[in-house]
Image: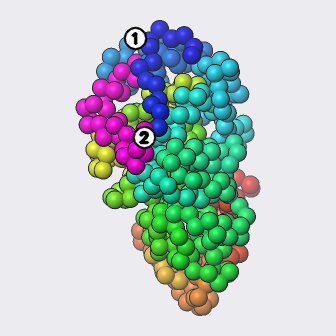
Amino acid sequence: MTECSVQNPYTPAPAPADRSQPDPEEMMSRDQIESLQVERLRWSLHHAYENVPAYTELFDGHGVHPGDFRELEDLRLFPYTDKEFLRKAYPFKSLAVPMSEVRRIHASSGTTGQPTVVAYTQNDIDTWAGLVARCFRLSGVRPGDKVHNAYGYGLFTGGLGAHYGAERLGCAVIPMSGGQTEKQVQMIRDFEPQAVLSTPTYLLTIADGFRKLGLDPRETSLRTAVLGAEPWTEQMRREIETAFDVDACDIYGLSEVMGPGVAGESAASKDGSHIWEDHFRPEVIDPFTDEVQETGRPGELVFTALTKEALPIIRYRTHDLTRLLPGTDRPGHRRMGRITGRTDDMIILRGVNLFPSQIEELALQVPELSPHFTLEITRPHRMDQMTINIERREQVSVEAAEAGGRQLLHAIKTKIGSSASIRIAEPGTLARSSGKLRRVYDHRKDV
Ligand code: DLL
């Protein structure tokens, strides 16, 4: 490892003999977690400052030094970072270790411009696998289960991140990746996995794949679905649980902070993902004033990684909007509410702010309408206009779907305060994604 004036207090433990039991850190009390955080933050701040010139410059410019950190409150003295900070360091200038210590490189997709590079040492990979295993175990996956992994393999962290986590838990992984829906159906039928890992919208596409072949997705061997990488709602959870007759749990993460497994949800309580606070210190801030919010108040999620070696992450602004809640099944670790949207996903329609997840929530309350929809925003005659393209459900008539559409528009008007128009599409005609689904097409910038 690179020299650092403070000794790293952490090294990942090997997989325990009994993988069905929680890690000791998972069961720590809040006080234990917080004292661990102080100790680990001290190292992490020094590590970033001493080994990454961009952090040295950033902290110096802010007039703050890692030595100023004594207690958790002091984290507020340190500056925020964001995607732009990492982009400027493209490709490898944000690494705190020599390339000879790096064992894996991923890159986050990034819809515009340069991708963001993320890298891992062997310890980072081991930690990551351990945390993903924790999430899966909490969500009801068991050692010995067969796990069908439909997250994309490649530069995206989803496929390999989930893969190593499932192996670490002691599962047999089927590395299916995203796409080839018919093949997904065949593999689930033939290999009889107990768990499936996928984005929520792609799992719905797989459900449609079953129905197309005249098969009932409720009759598979699947028992558990661990879903993430894109926002989804409680209504979507019910839709998926009913479609496959499974327990569906959330898994959250982002490449810059690690990948999948920063937080995971308990199948017993299904009340939001627990953030693994022995490795990540979360904060929620007001995205406009940058003020740190009290636990329970909504805002933008910010993470500081406590143990990462290759790519230190200090007060990284995720753009994800949520709130922190006290831990339940793992009381020492706080939970996050559902991600309601991203600051950069927010649609401002004639002055009203709205997120695609709000439309999803309302649409899924109308039985005639399917969860497959896109939002198209235009500006004819300088007036913002939103059109919802949404598929009717298979067994529903066009007239009934149109009546359902009117009901949805009314709900949007009364609950969100926006007027929109609707176009009912035929089942199976809107674009599907084998990974993260794009819901919003904003053409206002085209004119
Ligand atoms: O999506 C990592 C991941 C893979 C998480 C598989 C879960 C499962 P990125 O491609 O860097 O990494 O995208 C990160 O995706 O900032 C959120 O906006 C969104 N996201 C991830 N998980 C969830 C979730 C992976 N459970 C970005 N709910 C994040 C809502 C999520 N949004």
Residue count near mark 1 (Cα–Cα under 10 Å), binned few <14, some 14–19, many ≥20: few
Q: Give the range drawn in magenta.
A: 16-42
Vertical comparison of 411 with 78: above or below = below
Residue 235 image position (x, y, % from top left): 45, 68
Does residue 33 belong to the magenta stretch? yes
Q: Is residue 408 visible?
A: no
SS category of the residue bearing label 2:
loop
Q: Name the quadrant containing residue 6.
A: top left
Q: Name the quadrant containing residue 443.
A: bottom right
Does residue 157 belong to the magenta stretch? no
Q: Can residue 314 be seen in this view?
A: yes
Residue pushed farthest front? 17
> In percent of the image, x 63 and y 33: which residue is there?
118
Does residue 438 appear to the left or right of 363 in the view shown? Answer: right
Vertical comparison of 180 with 101: above or below = below
**What amino acid is at disc 1?**
Gly
Q: Main secondary structure of the magenta part?
A: helix
> In percent of the image, x 70 and y 28: which residue is there?
90
Residue 198 image position (x, y, % from top left): 58, 58
Q: Any mark on residue 110, and which? A: none
> In percent of the image, x 45 and y 48: which residue is there?
135
Residue that mark 2 sits on: 17
Residue that mark 1 sits on: 67
**What amino acid is at disc 2?**
Ala
> In percent of the image, x 55 and y 73: which residue is there?
220
Vertical comparison of 407 with 233: above or below = below
Vertical comparison of 169 with 362: above or below = above
